[in-house]
Amino acid sequence: MAQPRQYTGADLLVRPASSPQDPDLLLSITPERAGWDYISFQVRRLAAGATWSFATGEHELALVNLSGRYRVESSRGRWTGIGGRGDVFAGAAHALYLPRRTEFTVTAEVGGEFAVTWVPTDEDHAPWLITPEQVAVSIRGGDNVSRQINDLLPPGSPVHRLVLVEVYTPSGNWSSYPGHKHDVHIVDANGQLIEADLEEVYYFKMDKPQGFAYQRVYTDAASPLHQAGYPIDALMVVEDGCAVIVPEGYHPVVSGPGYTTYYLNVLAGSAQSLANQDDPRHTWVKQCYRGSDDRLPLYGRK
């Protein structure tokens, strides 16, 4: 799905950038910037009482609170009390899904930050507010590959393309590991989807401002960009408020010792799915886990 071009770490790592013309915009990813077809992504900040207005046009859109609390008034309905967590480490998010051809205004009831993402669609679906109580929370992996998964907008949701996931990776742990990819649409002889062709954004927050993680993005011979003569192999130091775009290839993450890493995943592509395939050299690791990290779940312990 990515347009044939050479990607370096500088292309894949997106840092926060202020704009005098739009001072509330903290980070922006456009299809033109990423070299792909679907995902637009922004992180925005609003002071208490401030507003931001937008129209979805021919896109489906989702808003995810990172901190603060918001009211949304739109041509499709009105919602209040969206959010309320002090930061991403305090609990699961709210997520508001809005269909195409919707005009809306976000007002900060309590100042904070939110992410907003949109992708083109030719389908109509009902608006939908996902609350933390509706978000399935699970622990994936094992040992030092344990991480917490919050499924905000999982496969099977009544939307067209968007998938949203929150992931928490404790100090020193690996995540998105073994490295997996989703850059070719593969259906087996029985019609089962083996792998979807998906674009992906990783948006990172750290539990301490000096925290960091590493992410590697690399392709193999099965990836279309690799076949076109544009292989990817980039290793990036990721800090608080940064994003990584994954046009193709495997993309594991490791959290710096002493810091808990959060990332919001946005995916869209050939199916509303997370169908992927592991790097075959490392998939054996999943058979060796002896237990789960007792630091998880991060919140909501009983």
Image (tube, helix red, strand yellow):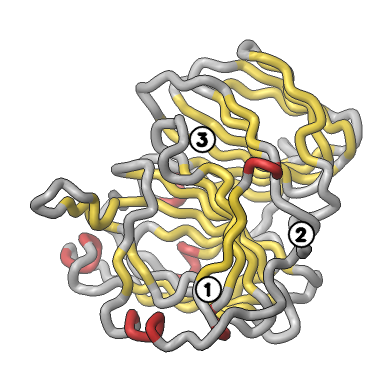
Tell me the kind of residue under disc 2: Gly
Q: Residue at x 52, y 62 (%)?
A: 244
Residue 89 visible, this orientation: yes
Is label 3 in a helix, a strand or a loop?
Answer: strand
What's the amino acid at mark 1? Answer: Ser
Judged from this view, the residue extending furthest toward the front is 302
Mark 1 Cα within 10 Å, few/some/many (few <14, many 20+)?
Answer: many
Q: Which mark is residue 118?
A: 3
Between disc 1 and disc 2, the foreground one is 2
Q: Residue 170, how many percent across, how many down? A: 67, 76
Residue nearest the viewer, comparing 49 with 170: 170
Question: As drawn, which residue projects farthest toward the left?
Answer: 189
Question: Does 180 sit above or below residue 288?
Answer: above
Residue at 19% from the left image edge and 68% from the top image edge: 222
Where residue 227 sits: x, y (%)?
A: 16, 66
Q: For the image shown, how many numbered marks are present on the structure?
A: 3
- Give the labeled residue for mark 1: 175
Q: Specify the quadrant of the image occupied by residue 212.
A: bottom right
Marked residue nearer the N-terminal end (1 or 3): 3
Q: Earlier in the sequence, mark 1 or mark 2?
A: 1
- Give the numbered dot on residue 300: 2
- Of the 4 image quadrants, the one containing the C terminus is bottom right
Q: CA distance from mark 1 to mark 3?
A: 25 Å
Residue at position x 58%, y 61% in the image: 138
User: Spatial distance from mark 1 to mark 2, Cα to Cα?
Assistant: 21 Å
> Is 135 on the left or on the right of 269, as rendered?
right
